[in-house]
Amino acid sequence: MGLLVNIDNGGTFTDVCVHSGAQVLHAKSPTTPHDLTQCFVGALTRVSRELYGGDDLSRLVRDIDYIRYSTTSGTNAVVERKGTPVSLLVEKGEEASVYGLIEAMRGDSLWASMVPIAPVGITVKPGVPIDSTELTAAVNDLLAKGAQRLVVALRTAEAEARVKEELLDRYPRHLLGAVPFLLSHELVSDDDHARRVFSALLNSYLHPGMEHFLYGAENVCKQHHLASPLLIYRNDGNSARVAKTTAIKTWGSGPRGGLEGALAYARLYGASTLIAMDIGGTTTDVAVVVNGQVKLNAYGHVEAGNTSFAMPELQSFGLGGSSVMSVHGGQIKIGPQSVGSVPGPACFGRGGTHATLTDALLLAGVIDGDKYLGGELKLDKERAAIAIQANIAGPLNIALADATERAIRAFEAEVAAVLVKTLAAAGQSADQAILLAFGGGGPMIAPGIAREAGVRRIIVPQMAAVFSAYGIGFSSLAHQYQTSLAGASVADIATAREQMRARAQHDMSGEGVDTAKCRYDFALWRDTAAGVEQTALDESALQALKPSADARLVLTASYELPSFTLAEDRAARHTPAAVSGSAQVLYGSSDGDRTPVIELDALAPGHHTSGPALLRSSYLTCLLDRGWSLRVSDNHDLIIEEA
């Protein structure tokens, strides 16, 4: 078996996890927002150094069986309002409402970012020729106001198809000035106009950026002769080729990778309630796993808008290691704006002047500035101090040390509030939940966040620093198809079933896999207030299906890819962890005393210790406060519990 490579492109860092036989390697590379293909190559190059001792990208790619690639680019574009603005053609009379969507989105700044130009209405009546003059005037009006992309959102697919013919006739796609356009019904069939239009708008808002760098990454793979197509990990938990992936399916795909890993960990540790907390550079992503399952929303929401696609209950908040910290009204405000990796936190020395959590943790002694990213990036304490002084200490009129502590505590409090709120929404209490802390920033101050939230047990995965990339390794190559059972006859259902099966076999063949080795699983999805209720269907149940107003027939065609194996925790050994040194930590229970430092790479199953302690490796740091104990599981994970 060749190499299995998983890459998670985040807003600040790009993470890579490699399965090489029994060995699992990982690395991080700064994300290059001006050219995301560059950090894709950078991540692979770091892997080649780990495997071969030098930069040999061509050899690495030839040795790879599969690359599964996810990105938080779409999530970050929504959080930071940095997608491509979209213009909208609707039916005349819907300009002010857009089928109720504007009312539903009222007060959400995402609408203004997606649709900065007022929608324009046109008249399309069945059996009546389209008024070409009216349509041309409407489109020209939008173009004159700066339209870059166009969504045609009418009530019926037939009306949209007629408009498409007119647009292609008057604005041929081979002309340089042609504006790209999308028909809402071509993206998804959904009788709820507001949902369908929001889905089309969001897809178009994210599409240009996604298209540019995903095809750029695919071209790199082709140039170096990757044996199989580059696979894109999606928010439905599956992977597929770039050409078969829509932009909206990449929204939340990075966090979804972490959720896939969280589901595996909930099974491994028998957790009845587990809350996953992924703190990256730009966002904190949170999801709850209850009894081995995550809530699946029938119509996943992105901020205030509902989409036409089922999505897991996974929320992203603008709280990360590179989130901008400032003072407003005497209180510290965090995010949602992020400085990413370029210019990055002030301590990166790349021109950043804003205060961030990373700057505060460096000043507090939690982060070792000489060993950040395995020592490849040296952090500048003086620049961090200047940023904290200018943006927090000065406005609050307090000492630098106090400002540093206030900044960290403010971050802990905001994330803890998110955890409590998310658990409550799932009907769970914090004191009964296990916190799975991962991401570059997740484990650093996890005990402080947990204490604030009332959580008493934490798991830090061995691959916490690249856990979303790691989680992608549990996914299959798959496609999903669905049809509504509302108003369908028994004959309609039978026809739809066979059409879905034929399309699935065709698509899986296009993925380059043996269709005889694929699974074709039918399920009945019922949409309830508590989420999607899923019932697997065997052949006899499939044949007996009847029409239903609230149900959908869903087919998942999948080809199983090799995945990681997890070791069951037996906790048979107990050996004190060796202390490698000490550090002065000016935060938490350490309070300026020399704090024992423990090298994570030296730990083995059965090792244990108690706080205060500072645990460090090339890509992972965890501050263990007094009152918390730690042991290493048989899976090499850190099990942290409040004494």
Image (tube, rainbow, N blue to C red):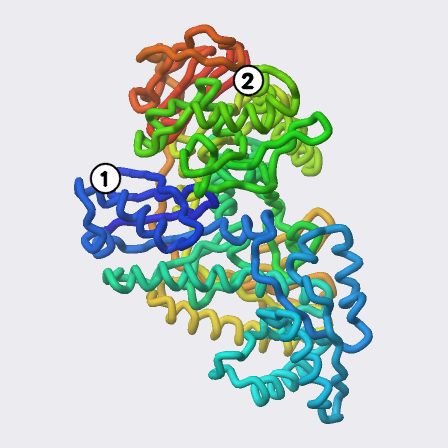
Upstream in sequence: badge 1 or badge 2: 1
**Residue 50's mark?**
1
How many other residues sit within 10 Å of disc 1, few (<14), some (14-19) or many (≥20)?
some
Q: How many marks?
A: 2
Left or right of 24? Residue 613 is: right
Can residue 471 be seen by looking at this rendering? yes
Position of 434 with respect to 298 (left or right) is left
The residue tagged 2 is 400
Amino acid at the residue labelled 2: Leu
- Residue appearing at x 59%, y 88% in the figure: 170
Residue at the spot 67% in from the left edge and 50% down from the top edge = 303
| Disc 1, SS | helix
Instruction: Give the quadrant of residue 295.
Output: top right
Q: In this picture, is 607 found above or below 48?
A: above
Label 1 – label 2 distance at C-alpha: 40 Å
The residue nearer to you, when weighing 518 against 321, is 321
Residue flagged by tag 1: what amino acid is it?
Glu
Quick check: can you spot residue 317? no
Indicate the position of residue 620 as horizontal and vertical percent values.
39, 28
Residue 398 in the image: x percent, y percent? Answer: 62, 16
Identified at 57% across, 18% down, the residue is 405
Give the class, few, some or many, for how many residues have Cα within 10 Å of label 2's Cα (few <14, many ≥20).
Answer: some
Q: Nearer the viewer, residue 221 or 477?
A: 221
Residue at horizontal 66 percent and vertical 36 percent from the top: 422
Percent of width and height locating residue 484: 66, 68
Question: Label 2 near label 1: C-beta < 8 Å?
Answer: no
**Image x and y of residue 21, in percent:** 24, 43
Residue pushed farthest top?
593
